[in-house]
Image (cartoon, coloured by chain):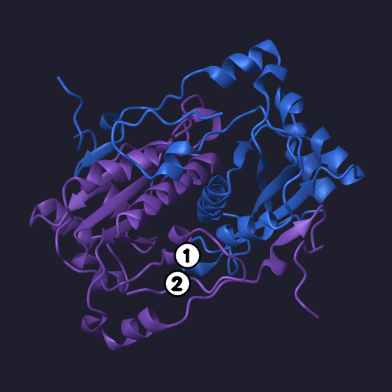
Chain colours: A blue, B purple
Amino acid sequence: MEKLANTQHEIHPLLKARWSPRAFDSRPLDPSVLPSLFEAARWAPSGGNNQPWAFVVFPADGSEARRQIEDALTGNNREWAPRAPLLVLAVAMPHPRLGTVGPYSYYDLGQAVTQLTVQATALGLFVHQMAGFDADKARQVAGLPDTCEPMVMIAIGHYGDYTHLSEALRERELAPRVRKPLAEFVFHARWGQSLFPAPA
Amino acid sequence: MEKLANTQHEIHPLLKARWSPRAFDSRPLDPSVLPSLFEAARWAPSGGNNQPWAFVVFPADGSEARRQIEDALTGNNREWAPRAPLLVLAVAMPHPRLGTVGPYSYYDLGQAVTQLTVQATALGLFVHQMAGFDADKARQVAGLPDTCEPMVMIAIGHYGDYTHLSEALRERELAPRVRKPLAEFVFHARWGQSLFPAPA
């Protein structure tokens, strides 16, 4: 389903087309897709080129690991996300010298996942990130080292049939996409001084 | 200057072409470029659609504000970044309910800046993010509220002439781009179990 961003100014078609659906199709991904998704993440920029990111991938292969990671989802993510052929746990890694996860670990992981998302969109796939999961359970299922931090679970797949969603989720699936106006968060030299003032 | 990523697997041309140069041209940006850069950032995904990002833009307009923000740069960023026609301070905003900047503020800001970077690349521009700046000074120059956190300074512009760089920076400008192999950070269901094992 197309749900193009209602932009105030033109942006690249891949950014305009990206959105986070819940109606995934359970059809498996072509195996050739996986390397390109993570290759895209790999070439993200990062502070000091530290690349503080890692990914643990759970294909819908009927495995016990997949069942367990689905069980780590919370709230209504438990309803829709298990249909996605790929669930990926995205992990923030410690700074190589400081040994701890810090602000730039999170920031750079966000950059890597966005590059993955652009690549997925270019391949006709959809990505939906979730913070709604039990991080301790996910950590245990994936066997993560203590020093890193699971940040998001990512559902990746083809678009499916939204009429399979429950009433509440169907409503969210069809709701218009909204964002703050540029006037509220882009300033010229000084906080509060909008670079693109709203029309009077 | 082209400096394509030396990819193990094919990725979208915009991701392959993106890199962080130091040899910016001082030629001003076409004013029509600015709205599209921030519109691209605007449509990034974020946890709970909180959009915890803001930007303070400093064009090279000879203003006192621009001079002061250049003066907030540290290390060798002071040498090359002032040539860029646009310097942007990217700011992580507090969670709207919790009132504090947290891991997802940083993560989502990283997503927004990556979308801005994809758009800049599509427009033939280059982006170089810096963590090397005096955050307190930048906060003061931009008049940021106490509750938010300046994360990166972003230089944006056309590519210039790298022979103008000092010897040390010229060497970095021409050095090959490197990343960890996929085998080191993409795992199958369990930490340490590579999804793409390195060839034996």
Extreme top residue here?
A167
Per the model, the C-alpha gap separating discs 1 and 2 is: 5 Å
Q: Give the left or right position of residue B139, taking residue A194 as reference.
A: right
For the N terminus of chain B, which image quadrant?
bottom left
Query: Same subunit under labels 1 and 2?
Result: yes
Residue type marked 2: Leu
Q: What secondary structure is marked by label 2? A: loop
Q: Nearer the viewer, residue B111 or B62?
A: B111
> Could you tell me which chain the residue with mark 1 belongs to?
B
Q: What secondary structure is marked by label 1? A: helix
Q: Nearer the viewer, residue A23 or B178?
A: A23
Mark 2, residue position: B4
- Residue sitting at 49 percent across and 62 percent down? A46
Q: Is residue A58 in sight in this rendering?
A: yes
Indicate whether B153 appears above or below A50. Answer: above
Q: Position of residue A97 (x, y in %)?
A: 58, 69
For the C terminus of chain B, which image quadrant?
bottom right
Q: Nearer the viewer, residue B137 or B28?
A: B28
Residue B123's quadrant in the figure?
A: bottom left
Q: Give the left or right position of residue B130, taking residue A143 as reference.
A: left
Mark 1, residue position: B16
> Could you tell me which chain the residue with mark 2 belongs to?
B
Q: Is residue B148 in sight in this rendering?
A: no
Q: Position of residue B122 (x, y in %)?
A: 35, 54
- Is tag 1's residue or tag 2's residue first in the polypeptide sequence? 2
Q: Position of residue B134 (x, y in %)?
A: 32, 59
Q: Nearer the viewer, residue B9 or B153?
A: B9
Q: Position of residue B70 (x, y in %)?
A: 21, 61
Residue type marked 1: Lys
Extreme bottom residue here?
B167
